[in-house]
Amino acid sequence: MKSLQEFESFYNQTLFREMEVLDARRKRVMSRLMSIIGFTATGMVLSILSAVYFVDPARDLHFVLIFAGPVVLLLLGLLFWGIWARDKNFVADFKKELIERIIHFISPDLSYQPANFIGVDSFERSRLFMTNIDRYNGDDYVFGKIDKTQFWFSEVKAEYKTTNSKGQTQWHTIFKGLFFVADFNKHFEGSTVVLPNRLGRGALARVLQKVNLSRREKLVKLEDPEFNKYFVVYGDDQIESRYVLSPSLMQRLTDFRKKHGSPLHISFVSSFLFLAIGYTKDLFEPSYFKSLTHFETVKPYFEDISLAVGIVEDLNLNTRIWTKQ
């Protein structure tokens, strides 16, 4: 795995000039956006002040200036943003010039498809989230092979909908973040699901964890206190789950959880490992408010991609202790 120091050298020697060109486009977009905001805000304030100080409230012109005028100005501002200010190709060029270059820098054996994502069938097959999905999308699909292990990951967002008493549809997030799949080189008869331990380790927590009506898998008791601090395990077969979750793998999952800092969802189904890491931010999207010529702006993209690719090494997936049946 390439180090941060190696990437900084690559950025300074290879990427910086491309980032200067992209950053000039970013600045142009921001300048136009600020102009639109300034003119729109000034026009709205003048329209409202004119209505308040110079127009009789009983006249139709008062309503036009205080309500209709600002709305029209706001709509015109949005129109100018879409037609004049926005750089329609900026995001695509950003992903090609930066994200794809970072991925190939980490490993030339990886492929990147910005508009593609892991399908909903794989997401459901993982058995990590049991809520029925009503809307599903994603982007930034990366796939390839590190040594002996094939893997793929992307950003995904899964949602379900409810309808309130007024008939209004409301959308709720099931999961948003990085979804990772790898060949585990072992065919499982059942499934083993490792979920975040949100209830603690007390007697009441164990009772509540055991009564999980949404799952067919049963609670699996493991004897690793540190692992149990972060995770709760469900499996179709207690023996198989303990076989899959060897002491070394439990330690690696614990270390990975502490390293990342966010709750993890992991499962072993068929011959695959599924891992979901929740994010609130969009991982590989540009920010118009940060300069691309500053290494600190670019560094998080390298770190996020390295974290995903590094799962293979962090969990020691290239050590083949099993073979598929």
Image (tube, helix red, strand yellow):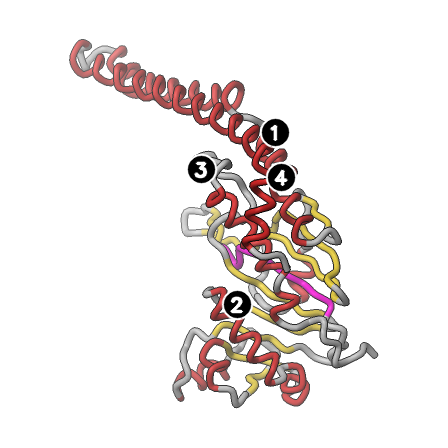
- Name the N-terminal-most of marks 1 and 3: 1
Question: Of the residues tagged 1 and 3, which is closer to the observer?
Answer: 3
Residue 128 pos. (x, y %):
59, 68
Q: Residues within 10 Å of mark 4 (few under 14, many from 20)?
A: few
Q: Is residue 30 above or below residue 95?
A: above
- Name the N-terminal-most of marks 3 and 2: 2
Question: Of the residues tagged 4 and 3, which is closer to the observer?
Answer: 4
Q: Which range of residues does the magenta coloring cover?
A: 173-183
| Circle 1: element type | loop
Question: Of the residues tagged 3 and 2, which is closer to the observer?
Answer: 3
Name the kind of residue labelled 1 in the image.
Asn
Name the kind of residue labelled 4 in the image.
Thr
Residue in the picture at 75% in, 60% down: 145
Which residue lies under the disc numbered 1? 89
Q: Main secondary structure of the magenta part?
A: strand
Which residue lies under the disc numbered 2? 264
Quote the CA–CA distance across marks 1 and 3.
18 Å
- Name the N-terminal-most of marks 4 and 2: 4
What mark, if any, has residue 14 been given in the picture?
4
- Name the N-terminal-most of marks 1 and 2: 1
Question: Of the residues tagged 4 and 1, which is closer to the observer?
Answer: 4
Residue closest to the eye, 234 or 87: 87
Residue in the picture at 62% in, 35% down: 92
From the viewer's perspective, tell me whether residue 198 is left or right of residue 182.
left
| Circle 2: element type | strand
Quote the CA–CA distance across marks 1 and 2.
34 Å
